[in-house]
Every structure is written in C-alpha cells, then in structure tokens.
Image (spheres, rainbow, N blue to C red):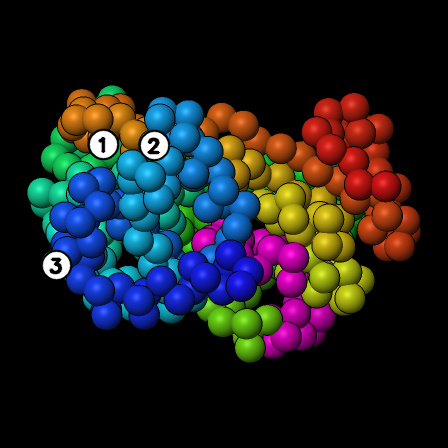
Amino acid sequence: MRRRSFIGLLGGAAAAWPLAARAQQTAVPVIGFLNGGTPEDSWVAALRQGLNDAGYVEGRNVAIEYRWAQGQYERLPAIAADLVRRQVTMMIASSTPAALAAKAATATIPIVFTTGDDPVKLGLVASLSRPSGNITGVTSLNVGVAPKLIDLLHEMVPNVTVIALLVNPANSAQAESTTREAQIAALRLGLKLHVLHASAEREFDAAFASAVQLHAGALAVGPDIFFNTRAEQLGALVFRHSIPAILPYRESAAAGALMSYGTNIPSLFRQVGVYSSRVLKGEKPADLPVQQAVKLELVISLKTAKALGVDVPMSMLIRVDKVIE
C-alpha cells in the first residue's frame, strides 16, 4: 500500500481505536497533525526528518495522527475539535485555515502552526517575538511575495498589459491579503489585474476560461494550501492553455508552468518538525518566537518558455535558483 493511501486511512482507524488508549499503551507523545489540503509524501517526509534531527522517530518514541481536510476548509473546526477530544500531546496546524481552527479549538494544548500570512494580523499570536498563549510556529510569508510574483511575471513578459490572479475564496484571509498586495503591484506597473476564484478542482476550467475571455496575457496563482497540493495539476493546466504563468510552487514549473517563486515547502516542514520537538521536550510555545522561513526559490522552465515563444531575460537567468531544461 502506498504511503499516501495509508495516511489517508489513518482517520478511519482512529475511530476504531481511541487515541488516548493508544498513547497509554505506547507511552509516547502523540502529535495531532491538521492540514487543509491532501496528503503530500514530501511534506510528511520533511516533517519526520525535522523530528528525527531532534531524536524523535515516528513509531518509536512519537506518534502522529494525520488529518487532511482535502481542501474542504469548513471541516477543519470539527477535525481540530476531535483531536482535542482525543487529548493529543500537541498539534501541528499546517496552513492558515488549519491554524485558525486549532487556535479556536483549544487554549491549552500546545500548537505549532505554518501560515503564509502575517500571524499577528491573523490574530494567531500577539507578536512574532513573544507569541503568548499556547501557540507558535513558522510563517513562510508567501502572501508577502504576491508583489514579487507580479514583478517577475511582468519582467518575463513585459509586453503583456492584462494579467489574471487566481486565489481561493475559501481561504478568505489569505485571498484578501494576496489580492490587495497584487493589485498594488499591478497598479505600480501600469497593469490591469483581473481576480479569478477557485476553491475546488471542478472550478479550474472555468477560471482558465474566464482568463481567456478577459484577454489576460499572463497568470499569477496566489499561495494557498489547496493550490499547493495541486501544484502539478495547475502547472499542466497553464501549459495546456499556453498561458505564461507564475506560481509559488516549484512543482508547477516542473509540470509545465513558465516559472515559480516561493518558499521551499519541504524545508518549511522540516523546520516545523524541529520546532515541534522543542515543544515535546517541554518548552512553552509562548517562549518560542515565531520563525520566518527565509528560503525563497526562483525556478524557470526553459522548456515552457520555448513552447510559449518567450525569451527569458538574462537578468532573470543570472539570479534563478533552478532551471528546467
């Protein structure tokens, strides 16, 4: 059985075997892992590596209960409440919607979150240096790169004056921040920006059709856990529609997008694993400053550029982190 299938079955197994009973029998701490997307093997492997670096090995001296909302963010509060009832030792809330749901579910169980937005503005923590309460985490500040996505897209295709931005309205806080920052960047560059929405796979085709109707010559995809877990699918879609596009996920560039710029997600999850181990060892989240992921990568697909007839500027080639031939 593939690892992804196994992870997806964990939720059903939990109902048959109460988590508290398992924790007592194995005498190990239990991490409740809450994510708004779908199972991603690379993320899980990176999380485990971060825990391993601090001496925690899943199945030996730590257990992890995985819960994935499959893009249905409205399920997150109930899933978080269930993990609280099962008395997990701590929670890892990966994505902004998951972090907000976890914080609302408990004021006592330690929480380590990931978010692409400013956790202070979201109300997750009092400040980055002194989070307070039972929660801390790592922010990728991917929403903060929204202007950079527009800048890079304009630099790559300077003759395009109308562009589209795809956001997920189900993740309202992140969608609003991304839209606001992208609109400011577009206005500065003299570009017309159309905002498109998709919160389910079935809405992708309609979003791309809208981009064509609006005569958008290029597309930027905003950061969102739902889009992240469908990075390869989105990369293939933009290639099929022959539209120059930039996404925050390097997998998209490998799948057909013109370029990507954003946080290295496996690196982020490894960082979360390391931070979670400190909580498991007794440190209080209130005393652990929110960390900021600083590794941002620019990936360009020369294969896609050639297919689209786009000449990649030398100014971009000299600072690219990875080139896909």
Looking at numbered disc 3 in the image, what kind of residue is underneath it?
Arg
Q: Secondary structure at mark 2?
A: loop
Rendering coords of residue 109 (x, y %): 14, 43
Point out the stretch of residues depicted in magenta: 205-233
In this rendering, does residue 122 appear at all?
A: no
Cβ–Cβ under 8 Å for marks 1 and 2: yes
Would you call the spot at circle 3 few (<14 residues within 10 Å), some (14-19), or many (20 or more)?
Answer: few
Q: Quadrant of residue 51?
A: top left
Please name the residue shown 49% across and 38% down the image: 46
Q: Nearer the viewer, residue 181 or 114?
A: 114
Q: Quadrant of residue 127?
A: top left
Looking at numbered disc 1 in the image, what kind of residue is underneath it?
Leu
**What mark, if any, has residue 280 been given in the picture?**
1
Rendering coords of residue 22 (x, y %): 20, 54
Left/right placement of residue 260 relative to residue 117 reads right
**Residue farthest to the front?**
25
**What mark, if any, has residue 56 been given in the picture?**
2
Cβ–Cβ under 8 Å for marks 2 and 3: no
The verdict on residue 215 being magenta is: yes
The Cα atoms of the two marked residues, 2 and 3, are separated by 24 Å
Rendering coords of residue 122 (x, y %): 27, 44
Left/right placement of residue 322 relative to residue 293 reads right
The Cα atoms of the two marked residues, 3 and 1, are separated by 19 Å
Q: Secondary structure at mark 3?
A: helix
Name the residue that disc number 3 marks.
85
Please name the residue shown 46% across and 46% down the image: 44
